[in-house]
Amino acid sequence: MRDTSYKKNYKMANKGKVFEEEIIKSNEGYKNRGIALIQKISTPWQVKRQGKKIVSAFPIEKSTLDFKGTVKPGLSISFDCKESEDERGLPLKHIEQHQIEYIRNALIMGEISFILCYMKKYDNRYLIPGDIVIDYWDRWQSNKGKRGFNYIPIDSMKEVKSRNGIVLDYLEGLGEAI
């Protein structure tokens, strides 16, 4: 019998790839217009080889968030991209503890930090401000196991769309914060 577990792992590894490509194209648009300089943050990986063949790979350390950059002098932003198939909103289990810690510290330091979420069922993209992420996370942690506390509802998110030639103008979703 053939081992097909790699197909499942490949599918999980590429989950959200199309959404991430939209963000990368948006960042190129921001850069080309002189609006912002935002880059993808790479996670360092350890690769195990047998000769020339790669047999496994795993992260060396936990990453921060997916993207980081500057919108204007002295204004830093950081954000992570998430994808949800839950029609109610973004399940909090999709956010890692170290990401919450990063968002919390970034907000304290004056950085604008948030999550961009692609809601597959509706084919819509949303921005969730960091303070809202932290508020729902803290509520979830203090009510562990209770229904209704384990996701960020869509009505707490700001929809973002294409605008002025930017594939996904998520900076518009930040409003007066920038």
Image: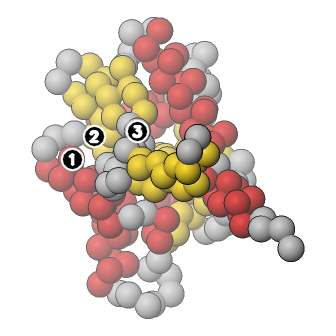
Mark positioned earlier in the residue sequence (2 or 1)? 1
Mark positioned earlier in the residue sequence (2 or 3)? 3
Amino acid type of the residue that numbered disc 2 sits on in the rendered structure: Ile
Q: Quadrant of the C terminus?
A: top left
Residue 111, image quadrant: top left
Amino acid type of the residue that numbered disc 3 sits on in the rendered structure: Ser
Q: Depth check: 125 or 106 in front? A: 106
The picture places residue 78, in percent across and down from the top left corner, at 33, 40
Report the colour scheme.
secondary structure
Q: How many marks?
A: 3
Q: Depth check: 88 or 71 in front? A: 71
Q: Which mark is residue 42?
A: 3
Residue 119: in sight, yes or no?
no
Residue 78: in sight, yes or no?
yes
Q: Is residue 137 above or below residue 121?
A: below
Residue at image point 50% right, 82% down: 148
Residue 33, image quadrant: top left
State yes or no: discs 2 and 1 in contact (Cβ < 8 Å): yes
Judged left or right of residue 125, residue 80 is: left
- Secondary structure beneath dot 3 equals loop
Residue at image point 22% right, 28% down: 75
Amino acid type of the residue that numbered disc 1 sits on in the rendered structure: Ala
State yes or no: discs 2 and 3 in contact (Cβ < 8 Å): no
Mark positioned earlier in the residue sequence (1 or 3)? 3
Per the model, the C-alpha gap separating discs 1 and 3 is: 18 Å
The picture places residue 34, in percent across and down from the top left corner, at 39, 9
Judged left or right of residue 113, residue 81 is: right
- Secondary structure beneath dot 2 equals strand
Q: Is residue 155 above or below residue 18?
A: below
Q: Find disc 1 in the rendering and name its residue.
A: 106
Q: Find disc 2 in the rendering and name its residue.
A: 112
